[in-house]
Image: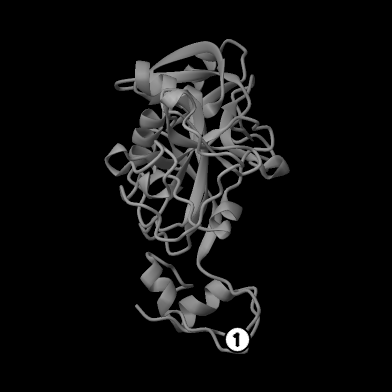
Amino acid sequence: KSYVFISPPLTWANKFCRENYTNLATFESMDDLKMLQRPDNSTSPSWIGLDSNSWRWSVTGKTSTTTYHNWASGQPDNGNGKEFCVTMRTDATWFDDNCASTRPFVCYTGQRTYTMIPNLMTWNNAQAYCRAHHTDLATIDNALQNEEIFSQASANIVWIGLYRVAWSWCDRSTSTFRNWYHYVDLLMTWSDAQKYCRENYTNLATLESMDDLKMLQRPYSSTSPSWIGLYDDPESWKGTLGSDSNSWRWSVTGKTSTTTYHNWASGQPDNLNGKEFCVTMRTDATWFDDNCASTRPFVCYTGKRIFA
């Protein structure tokens, strides 16, 4: 793979690259990024081959195997830039919606037996519930299935299993390389959060610079501390329990930071009651040691691959 920097500003960059090269640039690793040589005098942002609005079904993480959809007029509209999950409305049409809203939802089991769940949950919590008690949130491939779910919904606005992957590569490659953070609004212990991140992303968040912190977008409504991937390694304890910087390890590597960066709050870590061996990030972005058995939202990151 080789990269070519095109300096004339274009709005049709994708078309130009397909006609003259292969496609707009895609990046599958940090090595790919390092291969890209920009002119020394270039200070302008440049198009790459990443675009938005890729809708996926929860059960597969893939786009529909059919062309069926039932969007209402003007939908999806991504209102306020925060609508990445899908509801079915009382007329059986689909709307994109804020994933943090609480709604009833429809699960399915096996070969598409649908079950209406009246509990009010966020989309993520509804997904977790369906996966624990059924198969997944409802997937809809045709009008008959849509009508069946509509009949189950009993005049409620309900979550279905469609969600938006905010960005995808324009060549539709299978690369999942990102270097992004994902706030997960599910309450879990540190160990359960680690397991969830490893199964659905790469791992709990590793933060080794202020640039890493700036990349993390928390929901504006979030006031809870969130787990990150830092934990205290008892094998490395030295001096005062839980206070030696050499004992803190990142989940993804099991090793100490490759940089000297940390963002401990004043007086932290303090290992209160001798039980604080995991780390939360507070709303001011500072770090506190915390009891690993506490249940918190958490932050995953996506590195070279999403293990989903």
Residue 92: where, in percent of width, then height?
59, 23
Task: Look at 38% across and 60% down and name the residue there.
Answer: 173
Q: Quadrant of residue 265?
A: top right
User: Which quadrant would the N terminus be assigned to in this image?
Assistant: bottom left
Q: Quadrant of residue 36?
A: bottom left
Q: Residue furthest front?
A: 239
Considering depth in this image, is 195 or 73 the residue closer to the camera?
195
Q: Is the residue marked by circle 1 packed among few (<14), some (14-19), or many (20+) residues within 10 Å?
A: few
Q: Residue furthest right?
A: 80
User: Which quadrant would the C terminus be assigned to in this image?
Assistant: top left
Please give the residue where the numbered disc 1 appears in the rendered image.
Answer: 7
Task: Look at 51% across and 43% down and name the residue there.
Answer: 182
Residue 28: where, in percent of width, then height?
38, 64
Tell how many labels: 1
Q: Is residue 1 above or below residue 125?
A: below
User: Relative to residue 69, is residue 44 drawn left or right?
Assistant: right
Task: Look at 57% across and 59% down and name the residue there.
Answer: 211
Task: Look at 48% across and 63% down and name the residue there.
Answer: 170
